[in-house]
Image (spheres, rainbow, N blue to C red):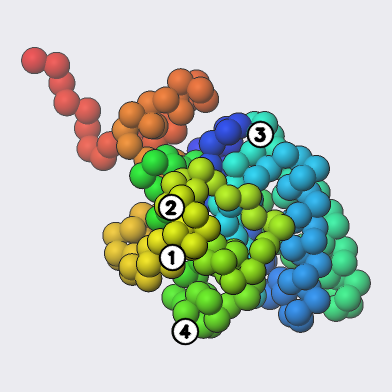
Amino acid sequence: MARIARLTFADHQHHIIQRGNDKQLIFREEGDYHYFIKLLLESSKRHQVAIHCYVLMSNHIHLLATPSTDDGLSHMMQWIGRQYVPYFNRRYDRVGTLWQGRFKSVVLDSEQYFMVCSRYIELNPVRAGMAATPADYVWSSYLHHIGAKIDPLVTDHPLYWSLGNTPFQREGAYRELVEQALTPKEIAEFRVACMKGWPVGSPQFKEQLEKLAQCRVAPLKKGRPSLPE
């Protein structure tokens, strides 16, 4: 199946993935994580992108973000790359690219999939066997969402605020939500969407995106089209 052009829309939520080239490490020491987070914070402010959720894995990153402009995500990620790759190459005496091509992004129907995506991202270290619980992994937004620390990188989404009237209620509700295991279907759906670049949402949501993009945003149905009677 041919890959469509990457879709990014202002004021819509996007799941972003950036991987290391050939699955190589993009973070080797604690200082690398700190420096990347510093760059992400600066670039997100510079290009007006709200970061709602994130995880930094050893060889890739996940973000859940809302850009204020159609090209905000691209500008943010490009700026980070121009700063981080030279830093990484100097630090580890290497040359060449660090990323596995351009970053991938998927537009989300927030009402249905925002919380699913947030759980998918913050449970990544658990699925990878790097932590027993998401609270054991410090390089993600999970500790912020359960009130264990204040993370200046995170902008809470209205759907997170809707979990309760007080911080205590929101944090407890979110903790219970993440403790609910994602189904194999949900995990597979996000993996396929990230690989293909198709939006995740209802048919009505995809129709709205097609009107905005003025192009097809979903795969064609398999098989021959039915003939009119």
> What amino acid does circle 2 point to?
Gly
Vertical arrangement, residue 164 with respect to residue 6, above or below: below
Q: Nearer the viewer, mark 4 or mark 2?
A: 2
For marks 1 and 4, the one nearer the N-term is: 4
Q: Position of residue 181 (x, y in %)?
A: 33, 69
Q: Quadrant of the C terminus?
A: top left
Residue at the spot of label 1:
172
In this view, which residue lies farthest toward the top?
229
Q: Residue at x 53, y 76 (%)?
A: 135
Query: Callout 4: few (<14), some (14-19), or many (20+) C-alpha neighbours within 10 Å?
Result: few
| The one of 1 and 44 positioned closer to us in this rendering | 44
Q: CA distance from mark 3 to mark 2?
A: 26 Å
Residue at the spot of label 2:
164
Residue 217: image quadrant is: top left
Q: Are marks 2 and 1 in contact (CB under 8 Å)?
A: yes
Residue at the spot of label 4:
132
| The one of 125 and 50 positioned closer to us in this rendering | 50
For marks 1 and 3, the one nearer the N-term is: 3
Q: CA distance from mark 1 to mark 3?
A: 30 Å
Q: Nearer the viewer, mark 3 or mark 2?
A: 2
Residue 148: image quadrant is: bottom right
> What amino acid does circle 3 point to?
Ser
> What amino acid does circle 1 point to?
Gly
For marks 4 and 2, the one nearer the N-term is: 4
Q: Are marks 3 and 2 in contact (CB under 8 Å)?
A: no
Residue at the spot of label 3:
68
Q: Position of residue 18 (x, y in %)?
A: 63, 58
| Secondary structure state at the residue bearing disc 4 | loop
Vertical arrangement, residue 216 with respect to residue 163, above or below: above
